[in-house]
């Protein structure tokens, strides 16, 4: 996955300064799920979509969700982080309009780029 130049766009979370960082309790998975998680993380590291952190303030667990094709989808449990971030005054626009509006443009970022919709 190609990186987006920080001069074009950068993403930062606004976390309420009164919120204390929370490290979720580690979840244990069976061997099958551990293999899926390990494979997905290696792919994301290879694509430089994620990186290793030392001494992170917030730690969130991954969650595996079974898709209709019986494959596993790895998601992240942002429950505690969502509680610490104030609500946005600007709600997200309809995703259909975003996809239609991006047609023909030079730069396009994919959400869940490795998954089939």
Image (cartoon, helix red, strand yellow):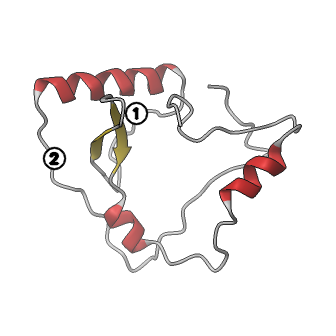
Figure disc tally: 2
User: In the image, is residue 111 above or below residue 101?
Assistant: above
User: In the image, is residue 32 above or below residue 24?
Assistant: above
Q: CA distance from mark 2 to mark 1?
A: 17 Å
**Image x and y of residue 113, in percent:** 57, 32
Tell me which corner region of the image, top left, top right, bottom left or bottom right, holds residue 95.
bottom right
Instruction: Specify few, some or many for label 2: CA neighbours under 10 Å numbering under 14, 14-19, or 20 or more.
Output: few
Tell me which corner region of the image, top left, top right, bottom left or bottom right, holds residue 32.
top left
Give left or right: position of 2 versus 28.
right
Q: Which is more N-terminal, label 1 or label 2?
A: 2
Residue, x 39% and y 39% (percent of image)? 53
Residue depth check, mark 2 versus mark 1: number of the one nearer the observer: 2
Tell me which corner region of the image, top left, top right, bottom left or bottom right, holds residue 97.
bottom right
Q: Nearer the viewer, residue 65 or 24?
A: 65
Q: Quadrant of the N terminus?
A: top right
Q: Residue furthest front?
A: 68
**Image x and y of residue 103, in percent:** 84, 41
Secondary structure beneath label 1? loop
**Image x and y of residue 111, in percent:** 58, 41
Residue, x 20% and y 29% (percent of image)? 33
Q: Answer yes or no: do the residues labelled 2 and 1 have beta carbons within 8 Å?
A: no
| Numbered tag placed on residue 103 in the rendering | none
Residue, x 46% and y 27% (percent of image)? 44
Instruction: Specify few, some or many for label 1: CA neighbours under 10 Å numbering under 14, 14-19, or 20 or more.
Output: few
Secondary structure beneath label 2? loop
Give left or right: position of 19 versus 106.
left
Label 2, on which residue?
A: 26
Label 1, on which residue?
A: 52
**Image x and y of residue 25, in percent:** 15, 53
């Amino acid at each position: 996955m190609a990186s987006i130049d920080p001069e074009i766009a950068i993403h930062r979370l606004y976390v309420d300064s009164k919120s204390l960082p929370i490290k979720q309790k580690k979840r244990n998975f069976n061997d099958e799920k551990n293999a899926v998680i390990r494979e997905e993380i290696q792919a994301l590291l290879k694509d430089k979509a994620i990186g290793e952190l030392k001494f992170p303030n917030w730690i969130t667990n991954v969650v595996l969700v079974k898709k209709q094709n019986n494959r596993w989808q790895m998601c992240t449990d942002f429950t505690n982080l969502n509680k610490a971030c104030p609500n946005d005054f600007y709600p997200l626009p309809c995703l259909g309009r975003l996809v239609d509006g991006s047609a023909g443009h030079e730069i396009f970022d994919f959400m869940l780029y490795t998954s089939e919709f």
